[in-house]
Amino acid sequence: MHQPNYIILQCYGYEAVFLECAYALMSLSRLYKPEELTNTEIWVYTDKPEWFDRFADCPLPLHFRKMDAALIKQWRGDIDFVHRIKIELLLDFTETRTGNILYADTDMVFLQKLDDVWNGLAPGELYMHMQEGKISEKGNPLFRKLDTFLRSGKAIKTEGTPLYDLYMWNAGILGFHSSHRELLQKALEYTDSEHPKFPKHIIEQFAFSIQFGSKGNIKSALPYALHYWNMKELRQIIASFLQYFDGKPWADLVRYSSLLQPYILVTEKNMFLQNRSFTEKVLNKKWVPAMPNWELLEKQI
């Protein structure tokens, strides 16, 4: 018997996050026919499940777990850390379910079918979005600060490979089997212990990097999904898209959503940042994407 597959999304708070979530679901609908998802459930942890009522004809196997303000506060913990919520909701989900799990932040788009991922999770493979580099190589200012912290007397010490010689992985996407639930608990314990001493957002993803890496080779989810964490500008384009195509059936939204092309926008933004003049860098000139002409683009599909 095949293990059930679960896709989990965390969607609460700002309207922009809900727009991202809708786009992520559209990208999944582009890849799968409804009959291909009979062994899959999609769970959205959200404070406003009614927001999704506008997509009543969406054939995806959607389920919702309501998070009210009290639960969100509880899951932020005594350290009041927003990224702690991710670990808690995964512990909540795996408390009563067995199967293959793919967690994703809302700022992502599915690129290809997940069949190979599902087939690997039950035997023990672990996925994160992509490797960002070794801490001790100090590839960015945050890594330099974390490296200093991990070498100090304040940080947790470990036998074997020093923590500063581990690789940091982006935790916007996590793939694991529910039998690895103890890794979630250990990630929570590390976060609760170290975040008060090093109160930076990367502590949560480093906690997952440590625990998933302890089981061997972490596999990259990048071939299957793009986590566009540094492309918040896409939110306004998604908002414009849904406004223009408001009232269209889900099938049309899915078809037209291919016009968004976030991977091209990521490239454009990176090129802009790399080619800024010295003065533009000093003034921190921002990249502003061109708003698509939906009326013109609609004719191209």
Image: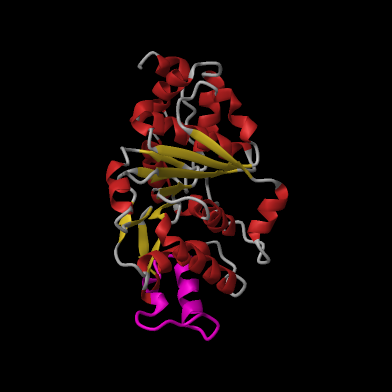
Residue depicted at 69% across the width and 55% down the height: 73
Q: Quadrant of residue 110?
A: top left
Please identify the quadrant where the C terminus is shown.
top left
Specify whether residue 8 is painted magenta: no
Can the viewer see residue 101 in this picture?
yes
Image height of 3 relative to 301, above or below: below
Looking at the image, what colour scheme do you see?
secondary structure
Residue sticking out furthest to the bottom: 153
Can the viewer see residue 141 in this picture?
no
Specify whether residue 148 is painted magenta: yes
Front-lying residue, 48 or 301: 48
The x and y percentages for residue 48 are 65, 37
Q: Quadrant of residue 297?
A: top left
Residue sticking out furthest to the front: 1
Please identify the quadrant where the N terminus is shown.
top left
The x and y percentages for residue 66 are 63, 42
In this image, 75 relative to 235: left or right? right
In this image, 61 relative to 79: left or right? left
The x and y percentages for residue 201 are 55, 61
Residue depicted at 35% across the width and 16% down the height: 300
Q: Which residues are magenta?
A: 136-164
Residue depicted at 49% across the width and 37% down the height: 234
Residue sticking out furthest to the right: 70
Image height of 88 relative to 116, above or below: below
